Image (tube, helix red, strand yellow):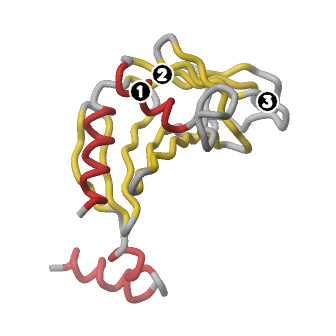
Amino acid sequence: MAKWMIALATLVAVPGLAAQAQSAPKAVSVHSGWGAFRDGERCYAIALAEPTPYARERQPFASVSVAPGAERFTMRLSRTIARDAIVTLDVGNRRFRLNGGGDSAWGKDSAADVGGGNEAIVAAMRSRDTMTVGARDTQGRLFRDAYRLKGAPTAIDAAIIACSR
């Protein structure tokens, strides 16, 4: 009884927290380290990067947001990238150049962009086993974040289905 009272008191005491709790992302399904979620009208598949012995500023993740007729690839990087850094994504044997800034990187808007767009990245993710993103951080050091793609296609499909309902 005390636990639910503390939780209720916390929600009432902090303005806006109750509304945030009601609109928290809802898990749709989990597939080998990739999860599918629905957050209001937005759905996405997401996974954390593989562990590494190297220093990180934050926990990196990769995400594919889905909307009717559009998939958008984004990443949070383990380190803040240098202002002029080139961010590359290797998906199996395919290489893509991403847009990036701060601690984020994202796919280009169309396949006509040099290096391929969101659709090409997601298509490659569906048929490869691993992907690795790399760039230089603000200290000039090269870093890489690696991901396993097992479960990614199923999680992306689950997110698409969740948003089509």
Q: Residue at x 67, y 34 (%)?
A: 113
The residue tagged 2 is: 131
Label 1 vs label 2, nearer the camera: 1
Residue 52 visible in the displayed image:
no
Q: Residue at x 37, y 17 (%)?
A: 129
The quarter of the displayed image where residue 33 is located: top left
Question: Mark 3 and mark 2: span between their CA atoms?
Answer: 19 Å
- Pointer 3 or 2: first along the chain: 3
Q: Residue 125 got which mark?
A: 1
* SS label for mark 2: strand
Label 1 vs label 3, nearer the camera: 1
- Pointer 1 or 2: first along the chain: 1
Near mark 3 (Cα within 10 A), the count class, few <14, some 14-19 or many ≥20, is some
Amino acid of disc 3: Ala
- In the rendered image, the residue lying farthest to the left is 1
Amino acid of disc 2: Met
Q: Residue 85 got which mark?
A: 3
Do callouts 3 and 2 mark residues in contact (Cβ within 8 Å)? no
Question: Mark 1 and mark 3: span between their CA atoms?
Answer: 23 Å
Quadrant where the image shows the C terminus: bottom left
Name the foreground residue: 84 vs 55. 84
Q: Residue at x 81, y 34 (%)?
A: 82
Q: Residue 13 at what x, y percent from top left?
A: 43, 87
- In the rendered image, the residue lying farthest to the top is 93
Q: Residue 116 got which mark?
A: none
- Establish if 159 lies above or below 55: below
Do callouts 1 and 2 mark residues in contact (Cβ within 8 Å)? yes
The quarter of the displayed image where residue 145 is located: top right
Residue 121 visible in the displayed image:
yes
